[in-house]
Image (tube, grey):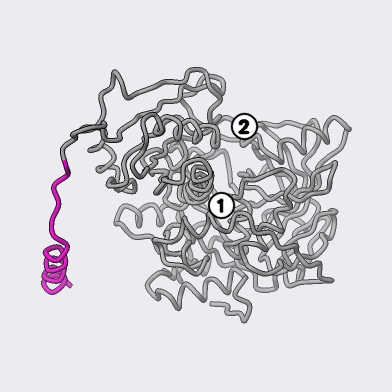
């Protein structure tokens, strides 16, 4: 496995994972098919309750090794930030406002190999088909770097990429966020949008691609803030967009203005093959990569990897937002049962009358994808669905504790929505005021003795 002296690279992080947990990496040395096999292995590991990072030495005919499921475990998220798992969301939330400007270098390892013209062929990369229903091979770990056509501010965002030909990709800008705005404004001027697509980088670069903040913030500065040091960048070879100097692979090209082509279906986080798409098209002009590049894939669909990439940054952002209004916010969870995108649980410490509804309203305003928010007291473990359902069963009355907001904007990928509109539901499952029964508990000493006995008996 490649090693490095620079910890802020993908290969540096892989070395850190191996040092932290040697069993946390599964090495597959025998050749596997480029279609379906990596996804099937990760999904079967999930069923067995396991979530190792998986390294494939040989995928199809590709010269590149493939790593996947890097984000399948919250332990690895915490390792990225240098904290324990129980501090993950708090630490992520605390770094949201840090900005450190990037440093432009003359060259970097990501441009060891530069392919242009006929050599810039997407078939060169181990781009795979993940599920039966997918319309074709998809790049699932595509961090798109683009510049605001009016200000030049850089944006980083995730978008699925369907291979349509040797130099053509189909994509969907269904988030309707910054890149969508860039393309709209460029199309009004009759222009394309130059982009660079990063495949494989340190996880903190990935986290920058998941960050949601003002359109005026340069997201390379956000990444620097997450790292605690400037991000080294180099100029693109065929587009006026800078790229991380230490990335593994970069695809350069342009989102074509006023061009639309069918894209999808694709296995989305909802667990369904989504045919909803903005049908944008990218024409590529170059592929650059490290001499010994590693191709990083993300298992799509409702995999733990895909959904946790939605949950972790959303929890950190919402926790920070709620605490600005309600300092008694204890924790936030985006549960897998709600696809880590459509449901949120909020725990409040001694909420005042009506505060649960106010907190839920702030959550809906912060994240348009949410369609259900359940608010509970701090004694409820919101990372365990059973406890949240228990609170609903014993502290909620449907006639007085449920509110509906009809015809609100929702997630376009939610297959149950109506032309982008959805009904949002608030459930107040906090304890009713006055004389409510106490939960039964055990002395801490007795719990400690029980745990020691279990450890002695079962290991």
- Seen from the viewer's position, the closer of residues 138 and 391 is 391
Q: Which is more foreground, mark 1 or mark 2?
A: 2
Taking the spot 62% from the left edge, 66% from the top edge, the residue there is 227
Label 2 element class: loop
- Seen from the viewer's position, the closer of residues 263 and 424 is 424
Q: Is residue 442 above or below residue 57?
A: above
Name the quadrant containing residue 359. top left
Q: Can you see residue 130?
A: no
- Seen from the viewer's position, the closer of residues 192 and 113 is 192
Chain part drawn in magenta: 438-459
Residue 128 marker = 1
Q: Is residue 375 left or right of residue 33?
A: left
**Residue 205 point in image, percent of width and height:** 63, 60
| Main SS category, magenta section | helix
Q: Which residue is mark 2?
A: 277
Please tell me how crowded label 2 is: few (under 14), some (14-19), or many (20+) other residues with Cα within 10 Å: some
- As drawn, the residue found furthest toward the front would be 434
């Amino acid at each position: 496995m490649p090693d490095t002296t620079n910890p802020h690279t993908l290969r540096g992080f892989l070395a850190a994972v191996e040092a932290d947990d040697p069993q946390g990496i599964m090495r597959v040395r025998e050749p596997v098919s480029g279609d379906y096999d990596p996804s099937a292995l990760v999904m079967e590991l999930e069923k067995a309750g396991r979530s190792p990072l998986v390294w494939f030495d040989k995928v199809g005919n590709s010269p590149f090794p493939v790593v996947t499921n890097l984000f399948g475990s919250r332990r690895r998220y915490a390792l990225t930030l240098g904290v324990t798992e129980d501090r993950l969301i708090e630490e992520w939330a605390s770094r949201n406002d840090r900005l450190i400007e990037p440093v432009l270098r003359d060259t970097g390892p990501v441009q060891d190999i530069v392919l242009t013209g006929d050599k810039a062929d997407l078939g060169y990369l181990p781009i795979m088909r993940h599920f039966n229903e997918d319309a074709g091979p998809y790049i699932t770990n595509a961090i798109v770097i683009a510049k605001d056509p009016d200000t030049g501010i850089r944006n980083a965002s995730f978008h699925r990429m369907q291979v349509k030909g040797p130099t053509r990709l189909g994509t969907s800008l269904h988030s309707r966020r910054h890149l969508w705005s860039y393309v709209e404004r460029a199309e009004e001027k009759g222009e394309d949008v130059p982009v660079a697509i990063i495949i494989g980088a340190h996880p903190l670069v990935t986290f920058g691609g998941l960050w949601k903040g003002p359109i005026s913030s340069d997201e390379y500065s956000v990444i620097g803030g997450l790292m605690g040091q400037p991000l080294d960048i180099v100029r693109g070879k065929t587009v006026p967009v800078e790229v991380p100097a230490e990335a593994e692979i970069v695809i350069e090209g342009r989102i074509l203005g006023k061009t639309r082509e069918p894209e999808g279906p694709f296995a989305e986080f909802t667990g369904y093959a989504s045919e909803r798409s903005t049908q944008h098209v990218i024409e590529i002009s170059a592929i650059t990569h490290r001499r010994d590049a590693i191709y990083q894939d993300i298992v799509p669909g409702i995999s733990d990897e895909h959904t946790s990439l939605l949950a972790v940054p959303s929890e950190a952002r919402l926790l920070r937002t709620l605490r600005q209004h309600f300092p008694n916010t204890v924790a936030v969870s985006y549960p897998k049962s709600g696809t880590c995108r459509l449901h949120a649980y909020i725990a409040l410490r001694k909420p005042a009358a009506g505060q649960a509804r106010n907190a839920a309203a702030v959550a809906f305003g912060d994240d348009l994808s949410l369609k259900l928010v359940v608010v509970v007291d701090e004694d409820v473990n919101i990372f365990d669905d059973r406890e949240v359902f228990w609170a609903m069963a014993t502290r909620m009355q449907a006639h007085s504790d449920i509110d509906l907001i009809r015809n609100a904007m929702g997630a376009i990928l939610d297959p149950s929505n109506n032309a982008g509109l959805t009904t949002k539901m608030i459930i107040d499952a906090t304890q009713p005021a006055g004389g409510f029964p106490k939960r039964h508990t055990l002395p801490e000493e007795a719990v400690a003795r029980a745990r020691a006995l279990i450890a002695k008996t079962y290991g």
